Amino acid sequence: MSSKLIAPSILAADFANLQRDVEMVNNSDADWFHIDIMDGVFVPNISFGMPVLQAITKHAKKTIDVHLMIVDPDRYIKTFSQLGSDILTVHFEACTHLHRTLQAIKAEDMKAGVALNPHTNINVLEDTINNIDLVCLMSVNPGFGGQSFIENTYNKVSQLKELINRKGASTKIEIDGGVTNKNALELVNAGADVLVAGSYVFKSSNQHNTIKDLKALANS
Ligand code: DX5
Ligand code: ZN
């Protein structure tokens, strides 16, 4: 079985010590940097934009996984590619022409991700799953770190895994929101491949060990 990945969410980092926190992730067992971009329109919060992403990518030595919580993401696909994104995830709910958006992301040599809000049914991906490298299942309502995990996510992981298998797709399943050592194992057992963790990592007293333990748990 391929190894399960850990993606610390930089939203929960200390922005006054961003380089320090990026180096911590570089030197940890983490696999990806998860970067949340919020526009204050698609979600009721604004996080950070291009200059901050540029500062992160200058020091980051691992895969850059960008999660766009913005309306009309097509406008910025080229920009995020130029800034060093390896994976670009757009929200299903923000795309009128999802298939076209996925093609545009791949044309910029990035992996294409689609995020689903907690209320969005898996079956909306029936006709696109073979074009998607990563599905990000939101296990909280997007917009803020530190919220509690929505339990129905386990069912959605199983349903998505079934869809991926049925269609012979190689899509990875990422879980985003409220991930801790309390739900990690059940999530990977249901079929999750990538666990995003923000507060659980950055608010812990030993971030390095928290990542190490979460990674070991997810692969146990
Ligand atoms: C929420 C973001 C998440 C967030 C996760 O809108 O997409 O990536 O940073 O934070 P935690 O792990 O604190 O729930
Ligand atoms: Zn996210």
Image (cartoon, helix red, strand yellow):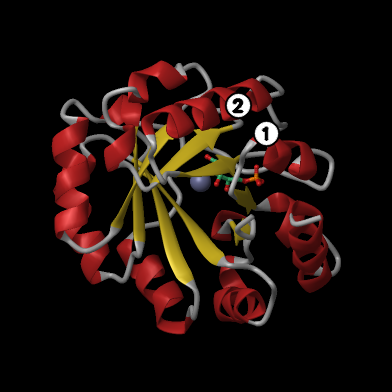
Horizontal arrangement in the rendering, residue 213 relative to residue 140 (left or right): right
Horizontal arrangement in the rendering, residue 58 relative to residue 34 (left or right): left
- Kindly indicate the quadrant of the structure image that contains residue 217: bottom right
> Which residue is more in the foreground, 203 or 81?
81
Q: Secondary structure at mark 2?
A: helix
Residue 220 - label: none
How far across and down, in percent of the image, does residue 198 sit?
Answer: 65, 53
Q: Is residue 126 above or below residue 27?
A: above
Q: Quadrant of the N terminus?
A: bottom right
Q: Earlier in the sequence, mark 1 or mark 2?
A: 2
Q: Residues within 10 Å of mark 1 (few under 14, many from 20)?
A: some
Question: Can residue 142 be seen in the rendering of this structure?
Answer: no
> Which residue is more in the foreground, 220 or 100?
220
Residue 190 - label: 1
Mark 1 residue CB less than 8 A from any atom of ligand 1: no
Name the amino acid, label 2: Ser
Q: Is residue 164 above or below residue 63?
A: above
> Which residue is drawn at the image coordinates 24% and 64% (left, top)?
81
Q: Secondary structure at mark 1?
A: helix
> Which residue is drawn at the image coordinates 54% and 44% (left, top)?
174
How far across and down, in percent of the image, does residue 144 sit?
Answer: 57, 39
Residue at mark 2: 158
> Are the two marked residues, 1 and 2, in contact with CB atoms closer than 8 angstroms?
yes
- Kindly indicate the quadrant of the structure image that contains residue 74: top left
Q: CA distance from mark 1 to mark 2?
A: 5 Å
How far across and down, in percent of the image, does residue 15 sit?
Answer: 57, 67
Horizontal arrangement in the rendering, residue 31 relative to residue 133 (left or right): right
> Which residue is drawn at the image coordinates 17% and 61% (left, top)?
108
Q: Is residue 130 above or below residue 23?
A: above
> Which residue is drawn at the image coordinates 52% and 42% (left, top)?
173
Question: Can residue 82 be seen in the rendering of this structure?
Answer: yes
